[in-house]
Image (cartoon, rainbow, N blue to C red):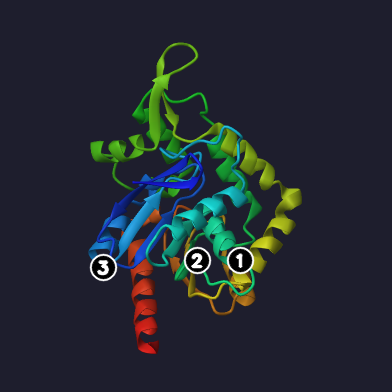
Amino acid sequence: MQFETEPGFLITADAWGDPANPPVLLLHGGGQTRHSWGDTGRWLADAGWYVIAPDARGHGDSDWSVKEHYGIEYLASDLRAICAQLDQKPALVGASMGGMTALIAAGERAPGTESICSAVVLVDIAPRAEQKGIERIFAFMSRNQDGFASLEEASEAVAAYLPHRSSAPPARPSGHRRLEKNLRLRKSPAGTMRYYWHWDPAMLAVWQHINEPAKQSQNADRLYRAARALTVPTLIVRGGISDVVSEKVMAEFLDAVPNAQSVSVADAGHMVAGDSNHAFTKVVLHFLLSELANERMSE
């Protein structure tokens, strides 16, 4: 399915479940695609939600901006446009960049206007994050921009970036197929066929500029203002071994946004949904079910 978020600009998404059910939007992180959520979409749909996982602009099969419009304002505008095209207010589940997008889209609204969503789930992201973790993400994304000779080579690069997954069994062919959804096979400048990450390299340059250390305080202040302005149930999900959202970072967020709930997923790093997909989905499902029950009791 596709959403037109500005004239002629299309966002591609996958969907699971009955469109009449309460909607949930799964918003992936930077450098990922809608395929990054594992089985979460299907499991939530089986539990009674209508789940939509879009590719952010500049990622996957969504349009790439020829003007390099990849700042948070454009991502938030896309999200607001998608929400406006749904029959019900969705719950927003955002990982990393997707979580920041959800915060800005939902928290920065005109006085007196209703929230665009029914709930917000921040997946290992907070207004103030650990700079070393952010730098490690950008370092990984900056490598291998000349592509990979094979899926095995790409898999080895991911394994080196995520050493805590090294105890898992070797990737099966199905694992390679999932990885392949985040890559595109095309001809290199040298004329050989290589696999490239399926996102616009211009997006990386924009986000590196946005997240320069000198701008960290300004960015955090803006995101905290947005978080404090949220009027819907909010949950922050931290990876238990994350180097982006430390225990200190999460405690700071909960002090600043006291109505928010929190959960840590043991043995998961920054990519919580990928590291512990079943445990992560159970956390999100429990939160959504609890808030739905609370909403019905208050009616």
Mark nearer the N terminus (1 vs 3): 3
Kindly indicate the quadrant of the structure image that contains residue 46. Answer: bottom left
Q: Residue furthest front?
A: 7
Mark nearer the N terminus (2 vs 1): 1
Are circles 2 and 1 on residues that touch, CB within 8 Å? yes
Residue type at tag 3: Gly
Please indicate whether residue 134 sits to the left or right of residue 173 in the image.
right
Q: Residue at x 46, y 17 (%)?
A: 188
Rendered position, 16 above or below 48: above
Q: Secondary structure at mark 3?
A: loop
Residue 245 in sight: no
Q: Which mark is residue 109?
A: 1
Give the spatial CA distance, label 2 vs label 1. Answer: 9 Å
Q: For mark 2, what is the residue?
A: 116
Q: Secondary structure at mark 1?
A: loop
Q: For mark 3, what is the residue?
A: 48
Residue 267 or residue 219, whichever sits in front: 219
Which class describes the residues within 10 Å of circle 1: few (<14), some (14-19), or many (20+)?
some
Q: Residue at x 60, y 40 (%)?
A: 69
Rendered position, 59 above or below 260: above
Residue 91 or residue 129, whichever sits in front: 91
Give the spatial CA distance, label 3 vs label 2. Answer: 21 Å
Please indicate whether residue 293 sits to the left or right of residue 81 in the image.
left
Residue type at tag 1: Arg
Mark nearer the N terminus (3 vs 2): 3
